[in-house]
Structures are given as structure tokens and as C-alpha cells.
Amino acid sequence: MSFNILLVEDEANLAHFLELELESEGYTVSVCSDGMAGLLEARNHYPDLMILDWVLPFITGPEICRRLRTTGSRVPIILFSAKDSVKDRVTGLDSGADDYLTKPFRIEELLARVRTRLRDRLEKEILRYSGLALNQKSREVFLGSQDVRLSAKEFDLLTYFLQHPRQALPYKHILNAVWKEDDCRNYNLVQVYVSHLRVKLEKYSSKHLIHTIRGFGYILR
């Protein structure tokens, strides 16, 4: 699986060196040389991971972290800096960075941290429950070893159930989460899609995973 990494670093020689090292590991790398360009690139192209210097033209690394987290971005961010006090580390991590690396650093350590953060991200993208595995990035679903083919809305519906296992989910919440609607007259839409989803899942398993709570909604258990 190929990952896209956004590197934001204004020192040209260091940026070029890091770009070559990351590409040699099989990553696709985009490079920005100032904070504003890095922020726009992150918002527009959704990288799998960001490597971010603290001191940048226009916008600092911690401020980029804060702005991305404020808008809901969960991209893993490795922040690096020559600032090495405990206060600086705390400030960097509190801004929204997932990891903090002090300059100068060994390239081997950076690559190890990149692998760790991408592994964590991949695990978070795969939702699992009772033999089901759903990959949110590739939009694939497996039940045991069987590939389950779902429509776009069926996939979104199953994702919502897997994000809330063993929770009683009202029709209204499901309708709002999957269809962005809250009109109770459309509750039958939820019922129709749940029925389709059950048929496809039960084709590969005798387990009855999605249970009806009469007059209320559904529960995955």
C-alpha cells in the first residue's frame, strides 16, 4: 500500500534530503516550503501523514496543527524542531501534533516514527467486529475471508454500525449520520437499507448481527 506524505520544511537542503530518503522507502512525497502552502496542501489533498517543521514562513508548525485539528483533520503529524525543552515539547504536542522530534535527528529514527504513525493510522481505518472487517480508506468489507460487495450507502450504514457496536441506535440518528436527514417520514429508508445489508452479510455467515429494536431503531451485537 502506497502512502502519501506531506513534508513542510523551508530549508531546501534538508527538505531535499528528507524527500529522497522517504521516497527510497516507497512513499509518495509532496514538499511545501512555507506554512501557508503546507496548510492549504493538507486541507486540499488529505495526505496520509505530515512531517512539519516548527519554524516556517507565514505560519508556524504548531499553528498549522491547531488549525487542522480545529477543522476536524485527523492526519498524523510529526512535528520537529531545534526547540528541545520540556515546555516546547508540551506546546508542540498540545497544538495537535502526534509526535515530536528534536533536531538534529537521525534519519533512521524519523523513518521508524513514520512507520509507527502510519501503522497506527491503518489500524484506525479498519473497523472490526465479530468477524467483520471494514477498511474505511479502501472501502472494502470482509466477513471472515469473504469479500462482501456493498453499495455506497450500504457501506456508510455498516460503517456507522461498526463505529457504535452494542449501542442502541435510533432511526433518527442513523438517518442523520448516513443520509444527513432527520425527517421521520424517511425512517422507512433506513429499514430498507438495513434489510439489504442483512441479506448481504447473512449470505456469508449464519450470525444475525444487526438486531431490530421495535419502534426505536437497531443495534449491532
Image (tube, rainbow, N blue to C red):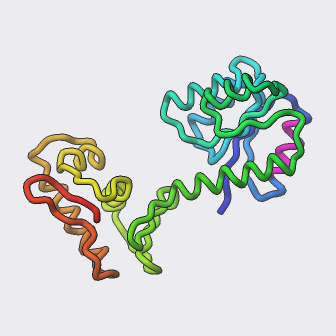
171 relative to 177 in the view: left or right? left
**In this view, 110 is above or below 214:** above
Is residue 153 among the parts visible in the rendering?
Answer: no
Name the residue located 87 percent from the left edge and 47 percent from the top edge: 107
| Residue 111 shown in magenta | no
Magenta stretch, residue numbers: 14-22
**In this view, 184 is above or below 85:** below
169 relative to 95 in the view: left or right? left
Give the farthest residue toward the front.
86
Quadrant of the drawing holding the N terminus? bottom right
- Measuring from the top left, give residue 128's x and y in whole percent: 44, 64
140 relative to 157 in the view: left or right? right
- Measuring from the top left, give residue 135's x and y in whole percent: 48, 62
Name the residue located 66 percent from the left edge and 50 percent from the top edge: 117
Name the residue located 20 percent from the left edge and 58 percent from the top edge: 218
**In this view, 112 is above or below 196:** above
